[in-house]
């Protein structure tokens, strides 16, 4: 898998639109500067820290290294989500989301990785993109409150909350959603008609994966690659996985040809 990851990453065109911002943010950290001076970097501070090792290499080499990591990690994530069933893994791998993430050098895949990690680490991963992970984080807060009480819940969320606060103090800003609508593959506001009932049902059943399915329908802005969070719930059998893969392509094609 490692060799295959390198080969696939090496064949990618040198586009890396999103990776450029992450790479420059990591480089800014190494120079002792604020990563929020980098145009297009809107993520919390630990994302910039995550990309500091890549900034030790040339941008082109760093991009291909990162793409190779995405390729290998994506197969691992899908394999784990499929309960280690290789057939379902291969079907889900035909979804366009992970290959788009490789091409653009984005971080959406880390949210799915957060599902497989201990909660203490997972919370940092699912909140690297709040539009993807915030609804799930709220469900985690509710479950933790019901199981361990208010004090334990506050302690669990305190570190990531402080890190977000620090990010804003040193310059993090929210993107202008109106400007980014041309890139969005969301269904706001009509998606609320489906998203709210799904999310309430996820709360009732404490279902993390269903909360992820509801998320794209709840957000004003949602990028095309971020729709990958619908996959975990679908990867129960071959038929639902195949259906989710077909839906994935429909979402990307509708977005690509601006049919929504």
Image (cartoon, rainbow, N blue to C red):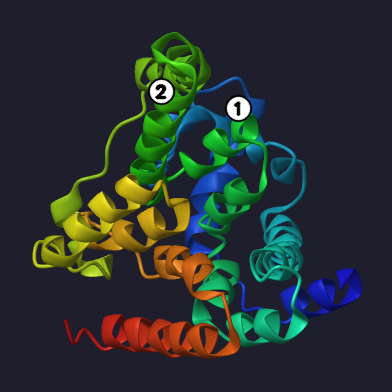
Residue closest to the eye, 238 or 164: 238
- Image position, residue 91 (x, y; %): 62, 87
- Image position, residue 170 (x, y; %): 41, 18
Q: Quadrant of the C terminus?
A: bottom left
Q: Which image quadrant is residue 258 in?
A: bottom left
Q: Which residue is mark 2?
A: 145
Q: Secondary structure at mark 1?
A: helix
Is 17 rendered above or below residue 132?
A: below
Residue drawn at x 55%, y 34% as measured from the top left: 124
First in residue order: circle 2 vs circle 1? 1
Q: Residues within 10 Å of mark 1 (few under 14, many from 20)?
A: some
Asked if residue 27 can be seen in this view, the reply is no
Tell me if 118 is positioned left or right of 142 in this view. right
- Total number of numbered discs in the rendering: 2
Q: Which image quadrant is residue 257 in?
A: bottom left
Tell me if 31 is positioned left or right of 257 in this view. right
Is 111 rendered above or below residue 89?
A: above
Residue drawn at x 43%, y 38% as measured from the top left: 43
- Image position, residue 242 (x, y; %): 52, 90
Q: Which residue is mark 1?
A: 29
Asked if residue 232 can be seen in this view, the reply is yes
Residue closest to the eye, 201 or 243: 201
Residue drawn at x 49%, y 13% as measured from the top left: 152
């Amino acid at each position: 898998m490692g060799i295959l990851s390198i080969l696939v990453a090496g064949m990618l065109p040198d586009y890396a639109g999103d990776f450029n911002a992450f790479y420059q943010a990591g480089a800014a950290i190494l120079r002792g500067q604020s990563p929020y001076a980098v145009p297009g970097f809107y993520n919390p501070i630990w994302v910039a820290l995550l990309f500091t090792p890549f900034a030790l290499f040339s941008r082109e080499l760093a991009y291909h290294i990162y793409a190779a990591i995405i390729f290998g990690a994506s197969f691992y994530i899908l394999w784990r989500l499929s309960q280690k069933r290789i057939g379902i893994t291969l079907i889900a791998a035909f979804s366009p989301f992970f290959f788009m993430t490789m091409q653009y050098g984005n971080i959406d895949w880390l949210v799915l990785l957060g599902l497989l990690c201990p909660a203490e680490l997972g919370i940092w991963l699912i909140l690297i993109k709040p539009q993807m992970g915030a609804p799930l984080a709220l469900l985690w807060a509710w479950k933790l409150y019901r199981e361990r009480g208010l004090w334990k819940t506050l302690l669990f969320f305190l570190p990531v909350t402080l890190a977000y606060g620090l990010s804003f103090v040193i310059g993090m800003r929210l993107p202008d959603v109106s400007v980014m609508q041309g890139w969005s593959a969301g269904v706001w506001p009509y998606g609320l008609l489906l998203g709210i009932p799904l999310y309430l049902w996820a709360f009732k059943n404490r279902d993390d994966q269903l909360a992820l399915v509801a998320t794209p329908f709840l957000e004003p802005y949602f990028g095309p690659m971020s729709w990958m969070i619908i996959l975990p719930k679908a990867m129960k059998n071959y038929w639902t996985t195949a259906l989710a893969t077909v839906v994935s392509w429909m979402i990307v094609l509708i977005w690509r040809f601006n049919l929504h």
